[in-house]
């Protein structure tokens, strides 16, 4: 059904040698020369190269004088030399500047992942920190101090595991503190522990790169495209749609929606021009 709706011929395994514009667009391919009054670039970004992602769209845009906003992996796991907790997951708030996301965090063998981290990765810049609240639903300071006031003799490890996955609780505590009864710990020590859990500052060493990135941030500058038709303001008949454009959405289907919506906008404008 999709092929029937597409109408034009679909050519697979076709190498493009050159794109140029005379009185119309000319595309030289390994299967012959194609000409058309309009050209739509829908070649995607750099994410997941094993599926065929290349820089082709950016090269065409530059050829015709378009600016490219710097590209980087987005919605991508972050690298971090933290505790060995691969497989542990917990709900957090991840922050970078004024941006925050409350979703799950997943510890991996190489760093941090999960929806909260993928979301914040689109805003993170190398050399900066992200702040993570490991227990956004609970005031851990009040909880621990209340247990101390009640003369709770439970080990700090046990008290903390009521709020965090056990492996995370164990790794967070220094060895000699884990077994100490909550009732014997100074208030200042409990407050410091709680503040650390609510304001864990992490400086990633990098990202998992385009191989693991769900999308590419950056791309063809939107100021040089029509917001209604995605047509180039520099070259009549040239359109850029989808991920090759500098538009990046959150998780949840927004990037798919952008691809489909921008394609529909371009297609409708071309249909009207026929």
Image: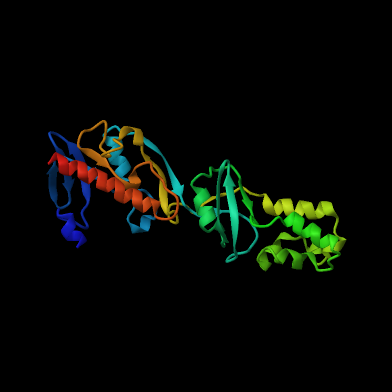
In this rendering, position of residue 176 left or right of residue 113: right
Q: Is residue 180 above or below residue 38?
A: below
Which residue is at the front of the view, 198 or 25?
198
Q: Residue 152's spot in the image, x, y percent?
A: 83, 66
Residue found 68% across the figure and 57% down from its top? 138
Residue 6 vertical position relative to residue 240 in the rendered view, above or below: below
Decide if residue 151 is in sight here. yes
Q: Nearer the viewer, residue 214 or 80?
A: 214
* Residue 170 shows in this picture: no
Kindly indicate the quadrant of the structure image that contains residue 134.
bottom right
**Left or right of 231, for residue 153:** right
Q: Where's the C terminus, which quadrant?
A: top left
Q: How is the image coloured?
A: rainbow
The one of 22 and 185 positioned closer to us in this rendering: 185
Q: Position of residue 179 (x, y in %)?
A: 81, 67
- Residue 153 located left or right of residue 241: right
Query: Which residue is at 83% across, 51% downward?
Result: 188
Q: Which residue does the image show at 32% across and 41% down from the upper left? A: 58
Picture coordinates of residue 39, whole percent (x, y): 20, 42
Q: Quadrant of residue 265?
A: top left
Count of all numbered marks drawn on residues in the image: 0
Q: Nearer the viewer, residue 33 or 203?
A: 203
The picture places residue 246, in percent across and down from the top left corner, at 38, 41
| Left or right: 160 as drawn, with respect to 134 | right
Image quarter of the N terminus: bottom left
Residue at 64% x, 52% y is 133
């Amino acid at each position: 059904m999709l092929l029937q709706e597409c109408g034009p011929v679909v050519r697979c395994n076709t190498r493009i040698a050159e794109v140029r514009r005379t009185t119309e667009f000319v595309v030289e391919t390994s299967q012959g020369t194609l000409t058309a009054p309009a050209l739509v670039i829908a070649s995607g970004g750099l994410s997941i190269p094993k599926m065929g992602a290349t820089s082709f769209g950016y090269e065409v845009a530059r050829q015709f004088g378009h600016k490219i906003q710097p590209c980087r992996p987005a919605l991508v796991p972050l690298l971090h030399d933290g505790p060995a907790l691969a497989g542990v997951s917990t709900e957090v708030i991840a922050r970078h500047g004024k941006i925050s996301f409350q979703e799950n965090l997943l510890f991996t063998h190489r760093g941090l992942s999960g929806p909260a981290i993928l979301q914040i990765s689109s805003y993170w810049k190398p050399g900066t920190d992200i702040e993570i609240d490991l227990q956004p639903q609970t005031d851990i300071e009040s909880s621990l101090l209340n247990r101390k006031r009640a003369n709770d003799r439970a080990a700090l490890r046990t008290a903390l595991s009521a709020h965090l996955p056990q492996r995370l609780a164990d790794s967070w505590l220094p060895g000699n503190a884990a077994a100490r009864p909550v009732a014997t710990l100074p208030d200042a020590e409990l407050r410091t522990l709680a503040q650390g859990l609510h304001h864990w500052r992490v400086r990633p060493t990098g990202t998992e790169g385009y191989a693991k990135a769900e999308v590419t941030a950056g791309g063809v500058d939107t100021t040089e495209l029509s917001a209604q038709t995605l047509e180039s303001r520099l070259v009549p008949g040239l359109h850029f749609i989808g991920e090759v454009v500098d538009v990046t959405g959150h998780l949840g289907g927004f990037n798919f929606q952008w691809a489909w919506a921008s394609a529909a906008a371009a297609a409708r404008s071309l249909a009207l021009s026929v």
